[in-house]
Amino acid sequence: MSAIDLDALRKLASLARVRLEDDELRRLAPEFERILEAFGTLARADLGTPAEAPELPAHARADEPLPSLGRDALLAGAPQADEGFFVVPKTIGSAR
Amino acid sequence: MSSAELDASAMRGAHARGERSVRLTIEDTLARIARIEPTLGALSAVLADSARTRADELDAARANGFEPGALFGVPVVLKANLCQTGVETNCGSRVLAGWRPPYTATVVERLLAAGAVPVAVAHMDEFAMGSSGENSAFGRARNPWDLARTPGGSSSGPAAAVAAGLVPLALGSDTGGSVRQPAALCGIAGFKPSYGRLSRHGLVAFGSSLDQVGPLARSVRDVELALEVLSGFDERDSTSLRAAPVARSARTSLAGLRVGVPQEYFGAGLDARVRATIETALGELEALGARRVPVSLPSTALAIPCYYVLATAEAASNLARFDGVRYGPRVDGDGSLEGMQAATRGAGFGAEVKRRILLGTFVLSHGYAEAWYGKALAVRARLRAEFEAAFAAVELIVSPTAPTLAFRLGEKSADPLSMYLSDALTVPASLAGLPALSVPAGFARDGASELAVGLQLVGPFGADAEVLAAGRLFEGATRHHQRRPALAAS
């Protein structure tokens, strides 16, 4: 059912934006296999009922502006900020 | 009398009547922490300066006629995933090392408004993913009853701190059992309220359809007190119940209470000593007038895979925000945006968090989502319906909280699947959003160690006060909660 090989795991890690070293991948692959095999009871379960989202309490407050945290407070925890902005590596016109 | 012998209610009373200054209690608490914490390893930060300042402010306020709040001068410990302005809130993860939030969680604001004094931040499994506390990047708490064993997880530090008598009350979070299971293994009370009962504004998210803040205390009486203070609608949490704060139930007897015992919770994975202790506890409930009724929750065997599919899917999404842009340290990687994010997350997350993010990404991925995520949603709906049917015939469902006694540190850390099974008896109530309490059921011997066993009481949605009342009456009759580990007497 699972067939999670190293390449598939590498793809998942890339989708999840998590860099994994080769030794981590090799350790993770059999663990993943074992977990998915054990959880196969779920995938194989014949439930008959259609999937439905759980009913959770949810509400939205009135669409009115309220006092909020200042920009400086929000930027204070960032690894790099400049002139009121988060700084990230260049994304336009970069090599990738 | 040392503050370690008082529960929160008694401590508050002594402060409010002026029999004892808050400063004395806080000095007492800090001295106990200095003495016991090096052995226990429960705390990631001690907030000595702010606690002393606050103690003096509270004493001054009382002297000026200020009406003392319900937790006036009570020292509390907070799990490292509850935001306090300016206090490092690292969730046990390197990815948030040094992060100081710019705001305070609603539950912490309510503790402060009631006069509580945060004295420390406690260790936890990274992002609340774990059942032993060993997945913390910063420190592994020990079980006060046997220092070679786990206190449980993921609220490992809060549970160990309360059980060792450092403080009478702590706040944790419970996604699949993270308050109840450590409470059980440490011999204290731990409560996961009905979904939406306590605000999660300022609780760092793991699995949003499951996460709940929960109090841990040495008595159910203190849990009730905490719930009165913490509950009530919060506009800043879109899942907050529009309900008044929970008032303590007036119930004074268990006579006639129908208590459901689900056969599926007493299956093959249950340790014989846990089973025997719970059987004795069930007999004690009957002696108090409760009526034991067999019930069935047939989908219980699917609860673990269902939980781990849903929780990891939600975690993969919630933890996407930790990408080296807005919080915590950054690792540059190959210099591209994607490379920086992957390198930051690769270096910042521990093995269990990576495993769960990848599992969550897998169960949501094209071609697999229906077979895994869709099935898990269907099982969840079925579990809820089964609980609902059972509650037509009983007021409470009781079971062991954890299938085993506290295991040795390191015993399960190389085997994630066996660790996941530690949650087998707590995840069903999480999936159904139900209020669930763990209360000390008794003790069992393993070699030279006496280890705590927890009794789990689950009620219908919204019946938080009734669950707690039953727990309070049970503890009042059995007094298991008054036993203390030798470490607490040191």
Image (cartoon, coloured by chain):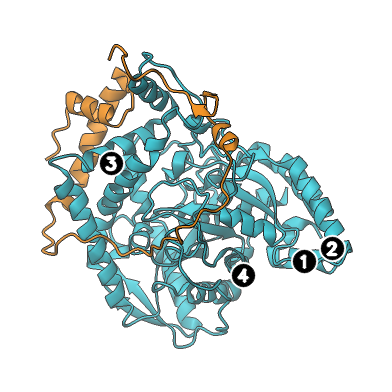
Chain colours: A orange, B cyan
Which residue is label 1 attached to?
B68
Q: Give me the chain letter of mark 1.
A: B
Which mark sits nearer the N-terminus, 1 or 4? 1
Measured along the vertical axis of the image, is residue B211 above or below residue B464? above
Q: CA distance from mark 1 to mark 3?
A: 47 Å
Nearer the observer, B410 or B388: B388
Which residue is label 2 attached to?
B62
Secondary structure under tag 4 reads helix
Amino acid, disc 1: Pro
- Disc 3 or disc 4, which is closer to the eye? 3
Which residue is label 4 attached to?
B221
Secondary structure under tag 3 reads helix
At x 75%, y 49%, the residue is B29
Say yes or no: labels 1 and 3 on the same chain: yes
Q: CA distance from mark 1 to mark 4?
A: 19 Å
Measured along the vertical axis of the image, is residue B56 above or below residue B277? above
At x 75%, y 47%, the residue is B51
Which mark sits nearer the N-terminus, 3 or 2? 2
